[in-house]
């Protein structure tokens, strides 16, 4: 279970963008978080992924309270997550080839030896050719780069996936392909999913249930 309880979060010297929000995702469940741009749902997703420290509230992962945020979180909790952001060019190191981008979490976890096999397997799953793996971000399209970012999110075989507007910048065919990759992975691994977006049709087709941001901020069901 991934549980966020009474989360208030914001940015330094600004009014909080998330106030008293609670949300839970059961193991293996897919939750869609629907809301307009700027409402705070991406901030909540970053809190859920231990990437942003809330001002108040708690995050509980598989029955254990979060032990820190960003690099201070215990490795067992950091590696439980795979995160895909809306803008792949802001999430990718422009100096890295796509193959190295995908392998980045393995190197950080001291599992460099696994990289060749894992990169090859995931590149095939997300639809990247060997030739594309040798390119750097400025040499590929947004869709190709987001495919690499999704592969990177899956390379440590996380128990929880956070997809924050993952398909917002993509065409319909690429969106369908990446959602299919996520669902194949979830079917094989039993991973839970928090999918953030503003496309109601996509979230309702993709997820087991969809929660509107207004329900969270007005005390509705979560």
Image (cartoon, rainbow, N blue to C red):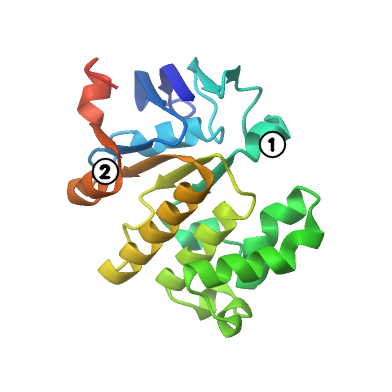
Seen at 70% across and 30% down, the residue is 72
Seen at 64% across and 80% down, the residue is 134
4 sits left or right of 61 in the view:
left
Report the front residue among 193 and 21: 193
| Badge 1 vs badge 2, beta-carbon distance below 8 Å | no
Q: Position of residue 96 (x, y in %)?
A: 66, 69
Position of residue 120 relative to residue 35, above or below, is: below
- Mark 2 surroundings within 10 Å by alpha-carbon count, few (fewer than 14), some (14 through 19), many (20 or more): few
Q: Position of residue 87 (x, y in %)?
A: 43, 57
Seen at 59% across and 75% down, the residue is 136
Position of residue 74 relative to residue 120, above or below, is: above
Q: Secondary structure at mark 1?
A: helix
- Asked whether the viewer can see residue 95, the reply is no
Residue tagged by mark 1?
71
Residue tagged by mark 2?
37
- Mark 1 surroundings within 10 Å by alpha-carbon count, few (fewer than 14), some (14 through 19), many (20 or more): few
Marking on residue 130: none
- Asked whether the viewer can see residue 5, the reply is yes
């Amino acid at each position: 279970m991934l549980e966020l309880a009474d989360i208030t979060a914001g940015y330094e010297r600004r009014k909080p963008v998330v106030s008293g929000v609670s949300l839970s995702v059961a193991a293996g469940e897919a939750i869609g978080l629907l809301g307009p741009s700027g409402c705070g749902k991406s901030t909540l997703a970053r809190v859920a992924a231990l990437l942003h420290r809330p001002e108040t509230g708690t995050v509980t992962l598989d029955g254990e309270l979060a032990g820190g945020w960003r690099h201070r979180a215990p490795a067992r909790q950091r590696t439980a997550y795979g995160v895909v952001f809306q803008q792949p060019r802001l999430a990718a190191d422009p100096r890295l080839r796509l193959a190295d981008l995908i392998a980045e979490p393995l190197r950080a976890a001291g599992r460099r030896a696994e990289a060749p096999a894992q990169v090859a397997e995931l590149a095939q799953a997300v639809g990247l050719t060997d030739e594309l793996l040798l390119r750097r971000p400025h040499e590929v399209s947004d869709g190709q780069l987001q495919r690499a970012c999704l592969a990177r999110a899956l390379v440590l075989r996380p128990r929880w996936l956070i997809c924050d507007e993952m398909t917002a910048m993509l065409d319909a065919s690429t969106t369908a392909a990446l959602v299919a990759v996520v669902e194949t992975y979830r079917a094989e691994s039993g991973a839970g999913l928090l999918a953030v977006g503003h496309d109601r049709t996509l979230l309702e087709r993709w997820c087991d249930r969809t929660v509107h941001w207004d329900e969270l901020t007005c005390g509705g069901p979560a």
